[in-house]
Image: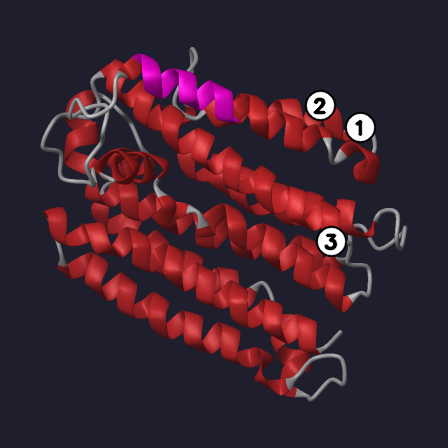
């Protein structure tokens, strides 16, 4: 049981709403457009979750190799750093899961076309390049940009594409899809910001130049607050249509931004008034806020289909 708990911590399950939210929103839009297909939807969920777990495990493994994570760190316990998991075992499990994820991705080709193959390869490379390679993105202040693209734009746009491509060609790049992908991107960036905000001192000492190390905590906290409000504002046309009582959208759709912004503002306040280990719960809280927003919006899109 203890071993299972260690591996669950390694997978960082609290962060999984970041990858899951984009896929769920895309599926909700496909339902709203009467273009939902079960098999590609399930495959997209599996692909996204496995891709994030691979990225999380690779991050832990390569941070260990670089000496970034130290025993007794402020953030959540790292199994390989504390000696609970052998580095070689973590590396092998990471690459096995990456291979499985690639197989899942190949199963999506009949729904999206062969042109998606290079995209899948690019995503697989990113899962490792975030922390590894000659220019690890997370070590050069590019982590937030990577999250915005690969956990926002990519999962929303391409999940929606494989859902509607064969059912209703021409709906692949609906404006709502593009706006929703950016919304999820900004919300996902906030999860990383909390993580880097907490670890700024350890990262600075280890030479890991995250955006928070580069710009400091105050600008990072301001960015966190602004990101949440921008994310909600991007879907302004959807909220406006709901407020007017559009037949396709229930009026309670506006509960998504209202509930999210209340929770988001509370999380921001706690971010600015806490330090050290007291910041640990805010990582899960930020991901939770994102998931609650996603569930409410998905329900509204489903009801309005």
Is residue 195 found left or right of 239 in the rendered image?
left
Distance from disc 2 to disc 1, alpha carbons, whole Å, reads 7 Å
Quadrant assignment for the N terminus = top left
Distance from disc 3 to disc 2, alpha carbons, whole Å, reads 24 Å
State whether residue 143 is above or below residue 33: above
Query: In the image, which residues are magenta?
Result: 88-97
Residue 149 in view in this figure:
no
Residue 287 percent coordinates (x, y): 38, 55
Mark 3 and 1 residues: CB-CB less than 8 Å, in contact? Answer: no
Circle 1 is placed at which residue position?
115
Callout in the foreground (3, 1) = 3
Residue 37 percent coordinates (x, y): 78, 54
Specify the label residue 298 is tagged with. Answer: none
Mark 3 and mark 2 lie on one chain; the one further toward the N terminus is 3
State whether residue 194 is above or below residue 267: above
Where residue 7 sits, quadrant-wise, is top left
Circle 3 is placed at which residue position?
38
Look at the numbered disc 3 and give the secondary structure of its residue: helix
Circle 2 packing at 10 Å, graded few (<14), some (14-19), many (20+), is: few
Look at the numbered disc 1 and give the secondary structure of its residue: loop
Residue 103 in view in this figure:
yes
Circle 2 is placed at which residue position?
118
Residue 103 percent coordinates (x, y): 65, 26
Where residue 141 sits, quadrant-wise, is top left
Residue at screen point 49% across, 61% down: 230
Residue at screen point 72% across, 77% down: 304
């Amino acid at each position: 049981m203890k071993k299972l708990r260690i591996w669950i911590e390694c997978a960082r399950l609290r962060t999984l709403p970041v990858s899951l939210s984009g896929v769920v929103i895309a599926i909700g839009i496909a339902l709203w457009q009467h273009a939902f297909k079960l098999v590609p939807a399930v495959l997209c969920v599996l692909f996204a979750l496995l891709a994030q777990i691979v990225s999380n495990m690779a991050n832990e493994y390569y941070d260990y190799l670089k000496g970034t994570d130290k025993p007794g760190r402020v953030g959540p316990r790292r199994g390989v750093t504390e000696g609970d998991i052998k580095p070689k075992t973590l590396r092998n499990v990471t690459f096995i899961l990456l291979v499985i994820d690639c197989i899942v991705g190949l199963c999506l080709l009949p729904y999206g076309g062969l042109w998606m193959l290079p995209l899948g390869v690019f995503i697989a490379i990113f899962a490792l390049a975030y922390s590894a390679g000659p220019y690890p993105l997370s070590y050069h202040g590019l982590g937030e940009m990577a999250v915005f693209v690969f956990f926002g734009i990519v999962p929303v746009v391409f999940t929606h594409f494989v859902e509607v491509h064969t059912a209703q060609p021409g709906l692949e790049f609906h404006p709502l899809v593009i706006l929703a992908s950016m919304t999820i991107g900004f919300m996902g960036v906030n999860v990383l910001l909390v993580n880097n905000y907490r670890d700024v001192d350890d990262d600075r000492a280890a030479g890991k130049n995250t955006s928070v190390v580069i710009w400091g905590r105050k600008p990072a906290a301001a960015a966190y607050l602004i990101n949440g409000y921008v994310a909600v504002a991007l879907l302004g046309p959807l909220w406006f249509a709901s407020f007017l009582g559009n037949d396709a959208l229930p009026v309670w759709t506006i509960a998504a931004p209202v509930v999210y912004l209340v929770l988001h503002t509370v999380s921001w306040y706690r971010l600015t008034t806490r330090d050290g280990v007291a910041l640990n719960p805010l990582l899960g809280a930020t991901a939770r806020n994102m998931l609650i927003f996603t569930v409410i919006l998905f329900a509204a899109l489903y009801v309005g289909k």
